[in-house]
Image (cartoon, grey):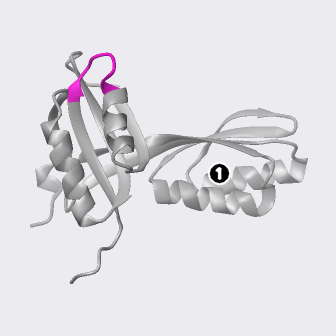
Amino acid sequence: MEESTLKKRCISLFVENEIGVLAYISGLFSGKGYNLDSLTVGTTLDPTISRMTITLTSDDMTFEQIKKQLNRSVPVIRVVDFAGADIFTKELMYVKVMGCTDEEMKKIAKIADKYGATIIDCVSDSMLMECVEMEKDNDALLEKLKKYFNGRMEIVRGGSVAIEALQANKET
C-alpha cells in the first residue's frame, strides 16, 4: 500500500455571491476536520459571483473528497484545481516593527528592499512595510526579521490569491 503524503494544494471556487456562502464553505471544511491554510474571497466582474482561493495541506485521497464535496454544494458554481497547472500566486502581508533605534531602522529598510517589501509608514522608532509576494518569499522575509526584531513585530497576512497562467505562457 502506498504511503499517503501531505502536499500543499490550491483551489479556486466560483460561488454565488450571497450572504452565508463563505460561512457555508468554511463550515464544510471544519465539519470534516480539514484545516485551511488560507481562504481569500472577492467578487468577480459579475457581481452575483465571488471567487474564493483556498490553500490547504492534505493527502491525495482527502483532497479528492474535498473537491467532490465542493462540487456537490449548491452555492458552488465551479471548482478549479490548480494541481499541475502553471499559476501566478501572491499573498499580501503587512509587518510593523516597533521600538527601533536609528541603526535598526536602517537595517529594516535594507531587509525590506532585499525582500521586495515597501515601507509604507514610518515614525521615529517604528516602521510599517507591505509585501506582496509568494507565501514562501513572505516566510523568508519574516524569518530574517525575526532574527533581529522578534517580540517587537506585528504581522498581518492575507490569504493567497491565484490565477492560471495564459495558455501561450505554458510550456508544451
The residue carrying mark 1 is: 112
Q: How crowded is mark 1: few (under 14 residues within 10 Å), some or many (20 or more)?
A: some
State the residue at coordinates (36%, 31%): 41
- Image spot of residue 119 (x, y percent): 66, 40
The stretch of residues the image draws in magenta is 15-22
**Front residue of this view, candidates 20 and 117:** 20
Farthest residue, direction bottom: 1
- Image spot of residue 14 (x, y percent): 20, 32
Q: In this view, does 27 lie to the left or right of 91?
A: left
Farthest residue, direction left: 172
Give residue 154's quadrant in the image. Answer: top right
The answer to whether residue 145 shows anywhere in this view is yes
**Front residue of this view, candidates 157 and 87:** 157
Q: Is residue 141 left or right of residue 11?
A: right
- Image spot of residue 127 (x, y percent): 75, 39
The answer to whether residue 86 shows anywhere in this view is no
Q: What residue type is labelled 1?
A: Ala
State the residue at coordinates (58%, 62%): 140
Q: In this view, does 152 lie to the left or right of 79?
A: right
Secondary element at tag 1: helix
In this view, 4 is above or below 81: below
State the residue at coordinates (21%, 84%): 1
**Front residue of this view, candidates 157 and 129:** 157
- Image spot of residue 82 (x, y percent): 22, 53
Q: Quadrant of the C terminus?
A: bottom left
Residue 130 highlighted magenta (yes or no):
no
Farthest residue, direction right: 101
State the residue at coordinates (35%, 28%): 22
Residue 16 highlighted magenta (yes or no):
yes
Query: How many numbered discs sit on the rendered protein?
Result: 1
